[in-house]
Amino acid sequence: MKFFKSFAIAAFAATTLFNCGSTSSVISTPIENIDTLPLKTAELTSAEKQHWGHLDLKNDTIPGMSVDRAYDEIIKNKKGSTVIVAVIDSGIDIDHEDLQGAIWTNTKEIPGNGIDDDNNGYVDDVHGWNFLGDGYDEQLEYVRLLASGNTSHSRYAEAKAEHQSEYDKYVGIKSNYEQFLQQIKNADDALKKETKKENYTKEDVEAISTSNQILQQYIAVAKYVYTMDFESLKEATKEISEGLVDITDRLNYNLNINFKGRKTGDNPDDMVEKFYGNNNVKPVKPSESHGTHVAGIIAAVRNNGKGANGVANNVKIMSVRAVPNGDEYDKDVALGIRYAADNGAKVINTSFGKYYSPHSDWVRDAIAYAASKDVLIVNAAGNEGTDLDTKDVYPNDAIGTGAEVSDNFISVGSLDSKYGSGMVSSFSNYGKINVDIFAPGGDIYSTYPDNTYKSIGGTSMASPAVAGVAALIRSYYPKLTAPQVKKIILDSGLALTTKVIVGGESSNVKPFSDLSKSQKITNAYNAMILADQTAKNL
């Protein structure tokens, strides 16, 4: 599932794709004090924007996870043990400058000898495994259902109607993008000529005084672009051009009934066929960036003077490439979870999801298998602003709102940086039964392929934030079990009762306490204190 950030210009709308010290008791801000905190009125500084998820609600009036406070006051100079965190996602740039020293290496394998040295079925799986092989572009799951021609399927008619609606929508979005992009390019050319500057500023634009109506229109376009947090029309052109590529991919691959993306040679409907794919866990095309961004949120090397700080130190990221540009296959997800559990991962992050799942039982079985290996799974709740208690989403550890297959699965909703009624990200799914907790996910700055960095929003960014907290707990309190770590994260969060806007609709206001099982936002500081208490009572 993917996050689309909406904006409008002139008489039409366009949408851009962004493919997330010891004490005797938990020290948290009392609920009544949290709910009466003054709203932060000042804009975030550049440093705060790149780091807000680690800040403290009480001290900064920013709904971060108090990660810095946990390091400053609790972790300090303590030495923890190494925790392997598997990231089941698209490929990860394991050569990124800010992930050096944080990538898992399978010491039981001799690299490049073409032999399965550890006899786990995966040849030369040095840094993880690639269940996609050479493939990346894929259909959505309901499009696969239509491609199968199985008109007797209980959801065939639903899938057909959804496909028609989505295809028409993205044809329209593509047209809007192209028009918007052309307006920006025309405005940029005109303003360069008017200011006689290649890199003119916002102030330069605002200083222009003209009676030329066409130039006035270009100035209006530029001013609108600046309201969208773009620093220049050049930056907007780049970002929107990338969005146009993603939308074109949506039409050519994700929604194309005739497209065949699978390149591994196996039958995705046959669980007996295993050990397909290869050991290349890196991205295979420039736009494949999601896994790298997620990995950095968890484990970008802290305080090295580069880019971003990950939530957790003492982490080794195991790359499991199983999420394509489209919907993941249930078989790849199930085998990816089992691979991670069998090869030492203690936390698995799954920042993906869909609403059709032909083999969801395979994935639930894998979640239960991970539980038997004491592995905690942290999952993104999704980006459709939907109540998951009324709509099935996959992967999940239960059928609908029924009984969970195990107690090792956390579903995470997303927060934005501004505390108050708008702090729940407009895109974030929610659910008092099927979402467990919320965490920072709006415009999170993290690693991007080729030693670059970028801010992206989505529950895909909130999930690894919580996975990082889980890794912290498991590093410094390794005797705690996966269910205990889950309980600590949920119990130690900050409970909020304030009313918030849900789904980005100002008319849809709900108490924050109705949006998740815990009724809380994740707090690393409190989690480490509660972990300490729990460990002492074992």
Image (cartoon, helix red, strand yellow):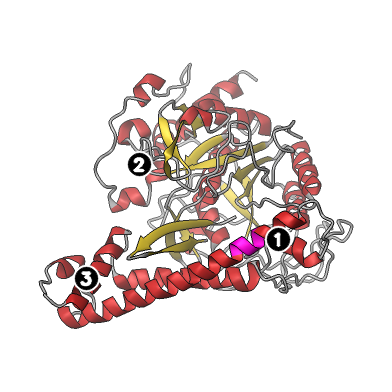
Residue 219, labelled with which disc?
3
Q: Position of residue 412 (x, y in %)?
A: 56, 40
Q: Where is residue 348? Give x, y as percent.
A: 65, 46
Say which element carries label 1. Answer: helix
Distance from Cα at disc 1 to Cα at disc 2: 39 Å
The answer to if 230 sits in the magenta stretch is no
For label 2, the residue is 418
Which image quadrant for residue 156? bottom right
Mark nearest the camera among 1 and 2 is 1
Q: Is residue 493 visible?
A: no
Q: Could one spot residue 60 in this view of the protein?
A: yes
Q: Which residues are magenta?
A: 162-166
Residue sitting at x 53%, y 41%:
413
Compared with 167, 423 (above or below) is above
For badge 3, the amino acid type reads Ile
Q: Secondary structure at mark 3?
A: helix
Q: Element under label 2? A: loop
Q: Quadrant of the N terminus?
A: bottom right
Residue 160 is labelled as 1
